[in-house]
Image (cartoon, grey):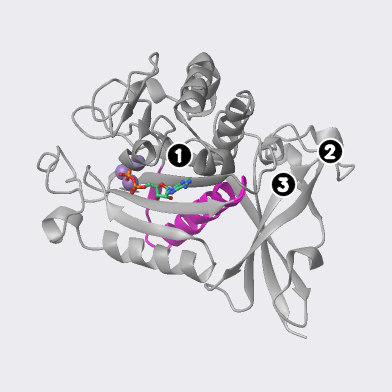
Amino acid sequence: MPKFKLEYIWLDGYTPVPNLRGKTQIKEFDSFPTLEQLPNWGFDGSSTQQAEGRSSDCVLKPVAIYPDSTRTNGAIVMCEVMMPDGVTPHPSNARATILDDPGAWFGFEQEYFLYENGRPLGFPKDGYPAPQGPYYTGVGYSNVGDVARQIVEEHLDLCLDAGINHEGINAEVAKGQWEFQIFGKGSKKCADEVWVARYILLRLCESYGLDVEFHCKPIKGDWNGSGMHCNFSTTYLRETGGKEYFEALMAAFEKNVNEHIAVYGPDNHLRLTGLHETQAIDKFSYGVADRGASIRVPHSFVNNGYKGYLEDRRPNSQGDPYQIASRVLKTIAEVPTP
Ligand code: ADP
Ligand code: MN
Ligand code: MN
Ligand code: MN
């Protein structure tokens, strides 16, 4: 029987942003294992801010498995962290707070910077490159540099090999800044895949001697920050919708503005300034095709009789997609459907 290398990955207890952790166990299976075949495992929570040293065991419960084409017989196993009883979610386990809804669909647009020696990849040692303009969706050495595209392409292939539902990639507005988009049906699937895609990117960049900078405003001045727009819909929004329901939904989002901002990523006041295609952090607004609004309403939504998906533009690149999906679905659940 082949021996499989199972990389169990999970989110640690650091706040406000959890880090990815992972360790490998070797197990024999006839063929690539299913989720049901994977045992729970454990780790030392006292080293990840998830337990005291005196009683340090936390439980890893597999929730999704992905082929890992970087290793022979490799798999990446996304796990939830559970208390020692194996059934109670650990307080750091935000995934467990997401309402189960197979009809909820999410699309996250993850922006990030590649970083070398504490500076965006392609920035000169001293000073700055030419101002923003040509970098977004750009081509050519002076716009994208020499290795960035290679990394981005390798990352895309590794994610597709893993079965992650990438929808696209592009060079972003600032030099050294990139984006990938992932879409998933079901309330947890897209968030799982964003975390696994982040894991694959971080690990890939190790061998290039590069870091991935997820902070939402890493460079001061006239350089774009990084977001993670959250596109969402439910069965009701897609199939019934209507202006009245939409307006009630937007009122619920406005009422919960602080609760949303609290989980939309740290330091978001540096990015949500009202400039650079953002709404100010203390304001809530929505608008058709309005990229300066908190929530952008696609033209298609209005043209289809207020049916379809909406785009919350406030979540930032460092936000936890589990906490974001959880909050969005909680606010939606507050609005009664006729
Ligand atoms: P932008 O102009 O903001 O980059 P895109 O059109 O590129 O917008 O991205 C919109 C995203 O919305 C897509 O990547 C997709 O994942 C997501 N999306 C499309 N339809 C739905 C839907 N019905 N429910 C949730 N998300 C959706
Ligand atoms: Mn986009
Ligand atoms: Mn973008
Ligand atoms: Mn967008």
The answer to whether residue 21 is left or right of residue 133 is right
**x and y percent of residue 337 in the render?**
62, 29
Residue 138 visible in image = yes
Quarter of the picture containing the N terminus is: bottom right
Marked residue nearer the N-terminal end (2 or 3):
3
Residue visible at 17% across and 49% down?
135
Label 1: state its secondary structure: loop
Mark 3 residue type? Glu
Query: Closest to the observer: 97 or 115?
Result: 97
Q: Residue under label 1, please give it.
A: 307
- Relative height, residue 224 to residue 262 (above, below): below
> Toward which corner of the image does residue 13 lie, by quadrant?
top right
Q: Say which amino acid is labelled 2.
A: Thr
Is disc 1 surrounded by few (<14), some (14 to 19) or many (20+) residues within 10 Å? Answer: many
| Residue 97: percent from left, percent from top | 70, 35
Q: Does the magenta stretch include residue 210?
A: yes
> Can you tell which quarter of the image residue 336 is in?
top right
Crowd tier of the residue under label 3, counting other residues whose Cα lies within 10 Å: few below 14, some 14–19, many 20 or above: many
- Give the main secondary structure of the magenta stretch: helix
Magenta span of residues: 186-213
On screen, 302 above or below 197?
above
Residue indicated by mark 3? 80
Lateral position of residue 1 relative to residue 225, left or right:
right
